[in-house]
Image (cartoon, grey):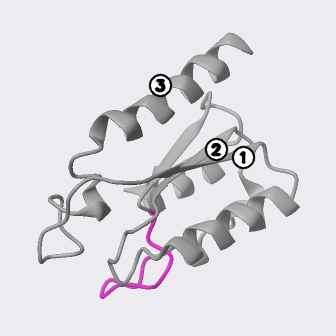
């Protein structure tokens, strides 16, 4: 979803109030999609990254999301970073019931999103 959301935001200009990217794919998956293939520097809308510090999914590493964030930040895109910690993880690191899916810390992730959305809306 993060790759599609980022691509839609890039293509739309300033039609969106903002775009939130969670557990972003930054290593090409079997379909070849990743944030590396999106011209993130061209996004003209506020962007939020939310990532779990312990996400162990092979296509959504923390360092990859952080690099994408920094790429946008260096380009002057209004971008914000939020890290989630804690929660639970099962044996499938890329599934919903893991750190990748913010399992057990959904409220923390949603809290970051809610706070950011309220801030973005209040500046419109």
User: Which corner quadrant of the image does residue 45 belong to?
Assistant: top right
Q: Which residue is mark 3?
A: 114
Local secondary structure at mark 3: helix
In the picture provided, is 107 more to the left or to the right than 70? left
| Residues at marks 3 and 2 touching, judged by CB atoms closer than 8 Å | no
At 54% from the left and 24% from the top, the residue drawn is 115
User: Which secondary structure type mostly characterizes the magenta part of the structure?
Assistant: loop
Q: Residue 112, image x and y in percent?
A: 49, 34
Rendering coords of residue 69 (x, y %): 68, 61
> Whole-percent x and y of residue 105?
29, 44
| Earlier sequence position, callout 3 versus callout 1 | 1
> Mark on residue 79?
1
Residues tagged 2 and 1 counted as in contact (Cβ below 8 A): yes
Image height check: is 27 above or below 111? below
Q: Quadrant of the N terminus?
A: bottom left
Q: Is residue 68 left or right of residue 86?
A: right
């Amino acid at each position: 979803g993060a790759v599609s959301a980022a691509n839609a935001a890039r293509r739309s200009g300033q039609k969106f109030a903002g775009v939130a990217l969670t557990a972003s794919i930054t290593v090409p998956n079997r379909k070849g999609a990743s944030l590396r293939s999106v011209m993130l520097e061209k996004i003209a809308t506020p962007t939020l990254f939310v990532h779990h510090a312990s996400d162990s999914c092979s296509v959504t590493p923390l360092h990859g999301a952080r690099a994408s964030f920094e790429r946008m930040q260096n380009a002057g895109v209004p971008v914000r970073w939020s890290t989630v910690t804690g929660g639970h993880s099962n044996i499938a690191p890329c599934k919903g019931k893991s750190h990748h899916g913010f399992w057990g810390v959904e409220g923390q992730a949603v809290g970051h999103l809610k706070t950011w959305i309220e801030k973005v809306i209040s500046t419109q």
